Image (cartoon, rainbow, N blue to C red):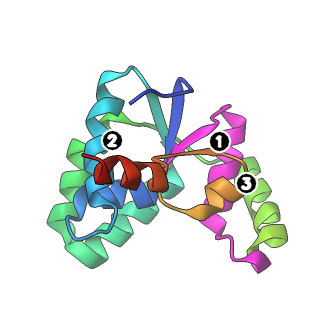
């Protein structure tokens, strides 16, 4: 797979899909992950995504799975820490987008991505696409490619 940008933000939805075999996006995440590791892509996320992912994995899959993700996956991702300014900007953005269903952590992610000049995201949420980010994988393209194999 070719990547159009040297930086890639990773969302909780992608991290979770990598670990949970029953997740509907697991196959896509599993196919994409090795190419991220071999294409010199700078992968980053926020500490808010880390907290959200650990909480989600521990509650659904247990401590062992969450800790395995922390050890095996998180180690290759640059975690950007949200400071007070970014937190406040995210809160303000959430106040304007939240009524449309956009979550607070997503708003924080948008601010972090803008701050670090990241245009591409690995995730399975429409909110990134709606905000103009290049979302990978393109689910409809992935499904078409799998159907032709």
All told, the count of numbered labels is 3
Q: Which residue is mark 3?
A: 131
Q: Which residue is mark 2?
A: 32
Q: Are marks 3 and 1 in contact (CB under 8 Å)?
A: no
Mark 1 secondary-structure assignment: helix
Q: Answer with left or right where residue 64 lies relative to residue 14.
A: left
Asked whether 134 falls inside the magenta stretch, the response is: no
* Mark in front: 2 vs 1: 2
Q: Answer with left or right where residue 111 lies relative to residue 96.
A: left
Q: Position of residue 37 (x, y in %)?
A: 31, 29
The magenta segment:
99-122
Q: Residue at x 53, y 23 (%)?
A: 6
With respect to residue 39, does 109 lie above or below? below
Q: Residue at x 39, y 36 (%)?
A: 77
With respect to residue 102, does 19 lie above or below? above
Q: Residue at x 29, y 68 (%)?
A: 23
Q: Position of residue 90 (x, y in %)?
A: 73, 58
Q: Residue at x 55, y 27 (%)?
A: 4
Mark 3 secondary-structure assignment: loop
The quadrant the N terminus occupies is: top left
Q: Which residue appears farthest toward the left when viewing the image?
A: 64
Inter-mark Cα distance, 2 to 1: 20 Å
Asked whether 108 falls inside the magenta stretch, the response is: yes
Q: Which residue is mark 1?
A: 113
Q: Position of residue 116 (x, y in %)?
A: 65, 33
- Nearer-N-terminus badge (2/1): 2
């Amino acid at each position: 797979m070719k990547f159009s940008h040297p930086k890639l933000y990773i969302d909780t939805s992608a991290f979770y899909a990598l670990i949970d075999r029953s997740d509907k996006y697991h196959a896509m995440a599993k196919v994409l992950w090795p190419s991220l590791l071999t294409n010199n892509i700078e992968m980053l996320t926020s500490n808010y995504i880390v907290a959200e992912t650990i909480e989600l994995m521990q509650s659904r899959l247990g401590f062992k799975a969450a800790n395995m993700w922390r050890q095996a996956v998180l180690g290759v991702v640059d975690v950007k820490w949200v400071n007070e300014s970014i937190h406040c900007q995210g809160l303000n953005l959430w106040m304007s987008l939240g009524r449309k269903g956009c979550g607070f952590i997503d708003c924080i992610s948008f601010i972090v991505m803008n701050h670090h000049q990241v245009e591409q995201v690995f995730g399975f949420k429409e909110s990134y696409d709606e905000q103009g980010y290049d979302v990978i994988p393109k689910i409809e393209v992935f499904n078409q490619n799998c159907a032709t194999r």
